[in-house]
């Protein structure tokens, strides 16, 4: 059998027709060209999305986001001169460590979103399936919302300083806009008609039957590590909830920013001033403003903003881990090298990005150490001056006759 004719994948219909004519979807016949068939349909994986370094980066982003937020919330309730307090809280109400985390996470998320868009464009327009491996289309949406969730912490909790607040809002909205392509692409795929099954093609035709498609999956995966229907349902539900969560915060943050510009130097939530600035009779805007102006005043909302992103992010991390298992199964079945476990330059950079947070903590610790040394020197000098003055003070005068 000449496997070279099965290398090019121009469209799903064309390739299934070619595969059927060549192998009749027989398991033994397809095994003879297994690497070629599996590579053409599912590609070879994309370390820019599912590599080991990227996965570690996702964990660091979620973990550091939750950790810095919890410390910020704890330290904001008391005053101290300790260096750790200054790391997460300062007199201006902004946390230097949390601010560094946001910048690192924002640029990391933007890079991931661009990698997702690049791979999706190749798949959506039939350019190439390489670099977009098995079942990875199902997880790209999860990755796109996963990297955006930790950015919610600084947006919702840090103080609303005019310049830094606008900077954070701009980056957050930029990442959200970049994630829209992944979300729309996945939604079209999920809502669009499937071409697998009897009569599923246009005009009631059949491209590939369910049984034949199962044979293809058995050849490429051996029946192992595939996503189950329950896993697909859970991931889809979590992605929808996370997307709605992000969309609401984007709308509320933009509206709060607009209201702050309309009421400079004032709180738009005071005396419902924000609602009074909106056109009358618009219940949707009224609801959004009421949510927005109470966003930072209700303890339940604050607790949800602290725990919500993590609760949503952990299952999405599990989804990325499952995707890596699928990719590994495909590599083993086809005899290819599993490239996602290789520490390349991009994988290392995804981890190094978040070392800036640790570097900021180390610098503040060292700076606090210098302050403590300076205070100790000043204290000793003060004590020395007191002793010196006591020893060198003139003797008391005696009465003279």
Image: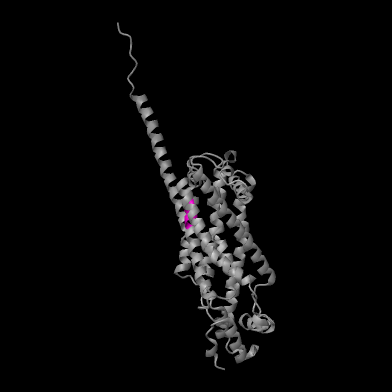
Give me the residue at 51% from left, 56% from top.
172
- Residue 135 point in image, percent of width and height: 60, 74
Q: Is residue 267 left or right of residue 24?
A: left
Where on the picture, by quarter, is residue 136? bottom right
Give me the residue at 61% from left, 68% from top.
187
Q: Is residue 379 left or right of residue 184?
A: left
- Residue 180 point in image, percent of width and height: 55, 64
Residue farthest along the left direction in this orientation: 401
| Magenta residue check for 341 | no
* Residue 281 seen by the camera: yes
Q: Is residue 141 above or below residue 21?
A: above
Give the colouring mode of the picture.
one colour
- Residue 112 point in image, percent of width and height: 50, 65
Read off the magenta span: 99-104
Where on the picture, by quarter, is residue 310? bottom right
**Quarter of the picture holding the N terminus:** bottom right
Give me the residue at 47% from left, 46% from top.
162
**Quarter of the picture holding the C terminus:** top left
Pick the front one: 49 or 387? 49
- Residue 52 point in image, percent of width and height: 53, 68
Give me the residue at 53% from left, 46% from top.
259
């Amino acid at each position: 059998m000449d496997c070279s004719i099965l290398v090019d994948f121009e469209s799903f219909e064309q390739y299934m027709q070619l595969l059927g004519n060549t192998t009749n979807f027989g398991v033994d016949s397809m095994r003879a060209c297994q690497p070629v068939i599996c590579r053409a349909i599912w590609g070879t994986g994309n370390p820019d999305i599912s590599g080991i370094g990227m996965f570690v980066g996702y964990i660091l982003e979620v973990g550091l986001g939750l950790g810095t937020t919890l410390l910020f919330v704890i330290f904001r309730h008391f005053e101290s001169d300790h260096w750790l307090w200054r790391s997460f809280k300062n007199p201006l109400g902004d946390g230097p460590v949390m601010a560094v985390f946001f910048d690192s996470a924002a640029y990391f998320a933007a890079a991931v979103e661009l990698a997702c868009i690049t791979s999706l464009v190749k798949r959506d327009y039939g350019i190439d399936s390489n670099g977009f491996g098995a079942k990875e289309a199902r997880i790209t949406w999860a990755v796109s919302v996963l990297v955006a969730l930790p950015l919610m912490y600084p947006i919702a909790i840090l103080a609303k300083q005019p310049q830094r607040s606008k900077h954070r809002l701009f980056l957050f909205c930029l990442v959200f806009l970049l994630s829209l392509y992944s979300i729309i692409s996945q939604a079209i795929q999920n809502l669009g008609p499937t071409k697998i099954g009897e009569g599923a093609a246009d005009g009631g035709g059949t491209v590939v039957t369910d049984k034949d498609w199962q044979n293809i999956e058995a050849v490429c995966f051996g029946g192992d590590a595939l996503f189950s229907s329950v896993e697909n349902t859970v991931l889809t539900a979590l992605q929808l909830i996370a997307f709605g969560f992000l969309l609401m915060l984007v709308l509320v943050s933009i509206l709060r920013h607009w209201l702050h510009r309309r009421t400079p130097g004032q709180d738009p939530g005071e005396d419902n001033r924000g609602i009074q600035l909106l056109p009358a009779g618009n219940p949707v805007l009224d609801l959004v403003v009421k949510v927005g102006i109470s966003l930072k005043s209700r303890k339940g909302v604050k607790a949800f903003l602290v725990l919500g992103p993590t609760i949503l992010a952990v299952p999405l991390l599990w989804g990325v881990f499952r995707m890596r298992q699928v990719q590994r199964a495909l590599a083993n079945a086809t005899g290819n090298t599993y490239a996602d476990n290789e520490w390349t330059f991009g994988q290392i950079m995804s981890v190094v990005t978040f070392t800036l947070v640790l570097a900021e903590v180390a610098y503040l610790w060292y700076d606090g150490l210098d302050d403590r040394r300076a205070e100790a020197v000043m204290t000793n000098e003060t004590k020395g001056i007191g002793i010196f003055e006591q020893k060198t003070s003139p003797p008391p005068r005696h009465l003279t006759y």
